[in-house]
């Protein structure tokens, strides 16, 4: 949506909390946190948040062997997030989608009803904001 850097002071706390959970591979919880934000939000980033929710759910399904569910959500993630490329709310959307696609490459290409595809932990996407949050929340180890 824009190339202009976001003021890190304006990041929504629930956005940052969802990123923390996402980067910990706790996709179910990141989806829950972002959904809480999305439910009450009515601004221009609504579909952006929805795209992140869909990405988390796709990865949750993939990690639990629900390849069909992950495949269905893969396309919707692009549908929501591409409109915000190349950069939105600190996220390099194009880079995120590239890493998301690399992780789900076999899933997206599969035509089997019930394929068996192993998740490669080395390909799991992460979210790193530019600029980072003032307190470094997204990269904090707990």
Image (cartoon, rainbow, N blue to C red):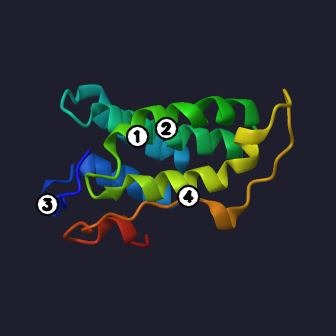
Please tell me whether mark 3 or mark 4 is closer to you in this view: 4
Residues at circles 1 and 4 in contact by the CB criterion of under 8 Å: no
Calculate the distance from the C-alpha at mark 2 to the C-alpha at mark 4: 12 Å
Question: Closer to us: mark 1 or mark 3?
Answer: 1
Pointer 2 with pointer 1, Cβ within 8 A? yes
Viewer-closest of 58 and 81:
81
Find the distance from the CA under tag 1 to the CA under tag 3: 20 Å
> 64 or 142: which is nearer to us?
64
Mark 2 touching mark 4, by CB under 8 A? no
Q: Quick one: label 4, few (<14), some, or many (20+) residues within 10 Å?
A: some
Residue that numbered label 4 is attached to = 99
Position of 135 relative to 127 (above/below): below
The span from disc 2 to disc 1 (Cα, nearest Å) is 5 Å
Q: Earlier in the sequence, mark 1 or mark 3?
A: 3
Please give the count of numbered marks on the rendered protein: 4
On-image quarter of the N terminus: top left
* Disc 1 secondary structure class: helix
The alpha-carbon separation of the residues under discs 3 and 2 comes to: 25 Å
Q: Quadrant of residue 92?
A: bottom left
State the residue position of label 1.
81
Earlier-in-chain disc, 3 versus 2 = 3
Disc 2: which residue: 78
Report if the CB atoms under discs 3 and 4 are less than 8 Å apart: no
Evaluate whether residue 40 shows in this view: yes
Secondary structure of the residue carrying numbered label 3: loop
- Is mark 1 in CB contact (under 8 Å) with mark 3? no
In the image, residue 76 lies at what x, y percent?
A: 52, 31
Residue 126 - label: none
Secondary structure type for disc 2: helix
Residue 21 visible in image: no
Residue that carries the numbered disc 3 in the rendered image: 7
């Amino acid at each position: 949506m824009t190339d202009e850097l976001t003021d890190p002071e304006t990041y929504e706390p629930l956005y940052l909390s969802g990123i923390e959970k996402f980067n910990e591979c706790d996709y179910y919880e990141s989806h829950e946190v972002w959904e809480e934000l999305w439910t009450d939000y009515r601004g221009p980033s609504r579909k952006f948040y929805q795209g992140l929710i869909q990405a988390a759910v796709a990865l949750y399904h993939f990690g639990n062997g629900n390849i069909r569910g992950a495949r269905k959500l893969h396309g919707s993630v692009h549908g929501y997030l591409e409109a915000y490329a190349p950069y939105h709310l600190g996220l390099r959307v194009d880079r995120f989608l590239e890493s998301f696609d690399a992780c789900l490459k076999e899933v997206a290409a599969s035509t089997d009803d019930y394929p068996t595809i192993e998740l490669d932990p080395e390909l799991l996407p992460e979210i790193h904001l530019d600029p980072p949050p003032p307190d470094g929340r997204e990269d904090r180890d707990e």
